[in-house]
Image (tube, grey):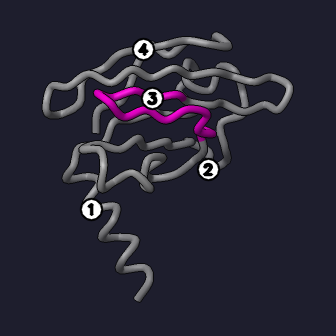
Amino acid sequence: MKILEGIQALTSQSLTTAIENGDSIQITLTFKPAVKMWFMDLVWNDFSVNGLRVCNVPNLLQQYDKIIPFGINVNVIDGTEPFIINDFSSGRVLLGILTPNEVQQINTSYEEAKI
């Protein structure tokens, strides 16, 4: 997993990063202080998703795992949810890009949990 660094305590910011196959993804993070939540827009090639609520999950993009070759991991150190503007800059919340293998491992974990 590639941890994204340099996310600042700003209400809106965009960053571009490469996934394992070398393609670039564009991520826009927006903090909404009225509801104390982070939201994400993401663009990769012809795929885009807007307004995803950033929450503490193994793969924020799980529902798209048959469409895209990566995932987004959100890990909140204290086990709660991202709700503070400096969550990423303080290190309380980590945002990571998952490889296809890591996405498959998470999917396998979900399947095993169903049994």
Disc 4 packing (10 Å; few <14; some 14–19; many ≥20): some
Residue depicted at 50% across the width and 16% down the height: 7
The amino acid type found where label 4 is placed reads Leu
Label 1: which secondary element: helix
Q: Tell me the quarter of the image containing the C terminus.
A: bottom left
> In the image, which residues are magenta?
41-54
Mark 1 lies on residue: 105
Q: Say whether disc 3 or disc 2 marks the residue closer to the N-terminus.
A: 3
Q: Say whether disc 1 or disc 3 marks the residue closer to the N-terminus.
A: 3
The amino acid type found where label 1 is placed reads Gln
Q: What is the CA distance from the residue labelled 1 to the residue labelled 3?
A: 22 Å
Which of label 4 and label 1 is nearer to you? 4
Give the label on residue 15, or none: 4
**Residue 3, picture quadrant:** top left
Residue depicted at 42% across the width and 14% down the height: 15
Label 4: which secondary element: strand
Mark 3 lies on residue: 42
Give the label on residue 67, or none: none
Label 3: which secondary element: strand
Mark 2 lies on residue: 79
Circles 3 and 2, Cβ within 8 Å, touching? The answer is: no
Q: Is residue 40 above or below residue 106?
A: above
**Residue 23, picture quadrant:** top left
